[in-house]
Amino acid sequence: MIENLVGIQIDDEETYAEYRRRLAPVLEAHGAELLFDLRVAEVLEARGNQTFNRLFLMRFPSLEAAKKFSQSEEYVSLRDTYFTPSVSNTVFWGRYEVSPDA
């Protein structure tokens, strides 16, 4: 299993909420799930342009599944329609492999 840890700067909560609502079935169709979605109250230190006010952790069954999801027509359409207009910054902290029982 693969997990992605990502921070984002949301500037339009309403549009982002619609993105999240529509994202759930697309994730499920790819065997993925959103494990955490956290609002960040205060960032005490950040290097460069690493501003974010949300932090989330997504889990995919494999690296191949994660790539297939991110390139799927359904996701690309959601990203372009809802994510991109509502988010001004994305900080990808990492992708790691975890055991299936985690």
Image: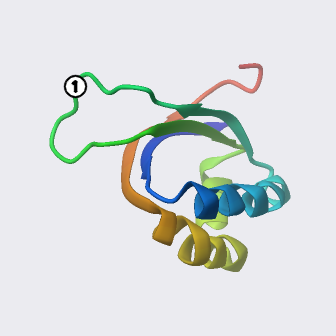
Which of the 4 image quadrants contains residue 78?
A: bottom right
Q: Quadrant of the C terminus?
A: top right
Residue 22 location in percent, x, y?
77, 63
Q: Could you tell me which residue is drawn at 43 percent across and 39 percent down?
A: 53
Q: Could you tell me which residue is drawn at 47 percent across and 42 percent down?
A: 6
Q: Could you tell me which residue is drawn at 39 percent across and 46 percent down?
A: 92
Instruction: Classify residue 47 as left or right of residue 19.
Output: left
Q: Quadrant of the N terminus?
A: top right
Query: How many discs appear?
Result: 1
Q: Could you tell me which residue is drawn at 44 percent across and 26 percent down?
A: 41
Residue 59 location in percent, x, y?
67, 40
Up-down relation of residue 72 to residue 44 (above or below): below
Up-down relation of residue 45 to residue 82 (above or below): above
Amino acid marked by disc 1: Glu
Residue 37 location in percent, x, y?
62, 36
Q: How is the image coloured?
A: rainbow
Query: 10 Å neighbourhood of mark 1: few (<14), some, or many (≥20)?
Result: few
Instruction: Classify residue 51 as left or right of residue 69.
Output: left
Q: Return the residue at label 1.
A: 45
Up-down relation of residue 84 to residue 50 (above or below): below
Up-down relation of residue 68 to residue 52 (above or below): below
Residue 18 location in percent, x, y?
70, 62
Instruction: Classify residue 2 as left or right of residue 88.
Output: right
**Viewer-nearest residue: 71 or 43:** 43
* Kind of element beneath mark 1: loop
